[in-house]
Structure formats: structure tokens, C-alpha cells
Image (cartoon, helix red, strand yellow):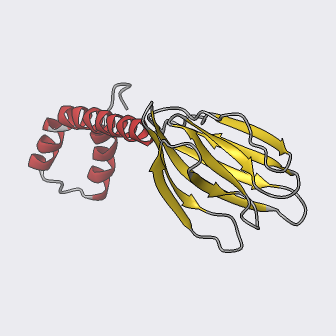
Amino acid sequence: MRPDAGPIDVVLPFVNVGCPNFPPFLEENMNRYKSLSRAAVLSAATLVATLTFVTVAHAVQVITTPNASIIRYALAAGASSGPIVPVAGQPVLVMGCQTNLGFRGVSQVTLLRVPSSFLEWVGLESTAGAAITQGFSGAAGTHILFLDFSHTVDLRVSSPDSFVVRNGNGGPAAGSVTLIW
């Protein structure tokens, strides 16, 4: 066997051994297409490699780590936190958790801050009468979301660019507000 033998050269001796009356025109056709078969194999390999790389390139997904801010509060009866300013121009997930025994609760809104204009939100109030909350306002004191079971601790609009946690309960309130954007 020649060192530069192709796939057809390997097949031909076996075909000729098995069939003594092998038609010569078939052997000529096989020799004629021998160089074409090498080109076809290289072309097919190139096509498979290209399709593989294209598929892998499309399958790569960019995953970004979100930004987050956790604001913890411990408020006396009737007190409010300092202003909390969400980022402007993109949705911010605001999750609240009230942790006082007997007044626990969880709630969340997706909020949009339109700079110097208003806050806009939609979400779900805390348990014990949980309901959808939605609206928009830049007026101080506008209710956004209750954080506790008895609906006395809430998020309220502080300015067109911020909100506060307000404790309307007769006792202290503690918990956290998490912003994710």
C-alpha cells in the first residue's frame, strides 16, 4: 500500500479480491473521484467545524451580577427612616421584610424612578389582606407598600426621587428593605 493512499485505494484491493470480474470502468471512476473525495472530506470537516463554532457562539449567554442594596431599619413608634433613593430610569425590585414578633411580614414592588418627576410601582402588599399595590406619585406621604402583617409599617413616597419606611405602629418596628437592580 502506498504511503499517500486515500480511502479509495484502501477499498479497491478488497473489492477486486471479492469480485474477479470487476468492471474496469468502475475502477476508473473510483480513481477519478479519489481527489474529489479528499476535497469533499475537507469541505465537510470545515463545514462541521464552522457550524459547531457558530452554535457555541450563539449558546454563550452573558450573565451579569445584579446590584443590590440592603437597608436595615429599627424605628420607634411613629418614626420614619431617612430617604431611600433608587436608581433612575430602570426597574428596581424592592423587597421588604418586617421582623418584629407578632407583626412579621414580607412584600415586594417593582419600582421605577423618573428623576425629579415621580416614583411608579406595582407589587404585592404584605399578608393579612395581601393585595396588588400599584400607582405613581411624587407627592410626599403617598402609600406605596405595607411591610407588616397588620398593615401599619409601610413604604411611602418621600419626594419625587425617594421613599421612606414609616412606622405607624404603636411599638417599635424592625426589618429590612432590599433593592435589586
Residue 42 quadrant: top left
Q: Quadrant of the C terminus?
A: top right
Taking the image as shown, residue 175 lies to the left or right of residue 2, namely right
Residue 141 falls left or right of residue 96: left
Q: Residue furthest top?
A: 3
Kindly identify the residue that appears in the image at 50 percent across and 43 percent down: 139
Between 66 and 40, the residue placed more toward the observer is 66
Provide residue 45's location: percent of width, then percent of height.
33, 36
Q: Residue at 45% x, 40% y: name it.
A: 118
Q: Could you tell me which quadrant the N terminus lies in? A: top left
**Position in image of residue 175 (x %, y %):** 81, 49
Q: Residue at x 60, y 35 (%)?
A: 65
- Total marks shown come to 0
Q: Residue at x 58, y 70 (%)?
A: 131
Q: Is residue 72 above or below residue 124?
A: above
Q: Quadrant of residue 33?
A: top left
Vertical position of residue 119 compared to residue 107: above or below = above
Q: Position of residue 172 (x, y in %)?
A: 88, 51
Between 47 and 41, the one lying in front of the other is 47
Question: Which residue, as the protein is rendered here, is positioned at the far left?
Answer: 25
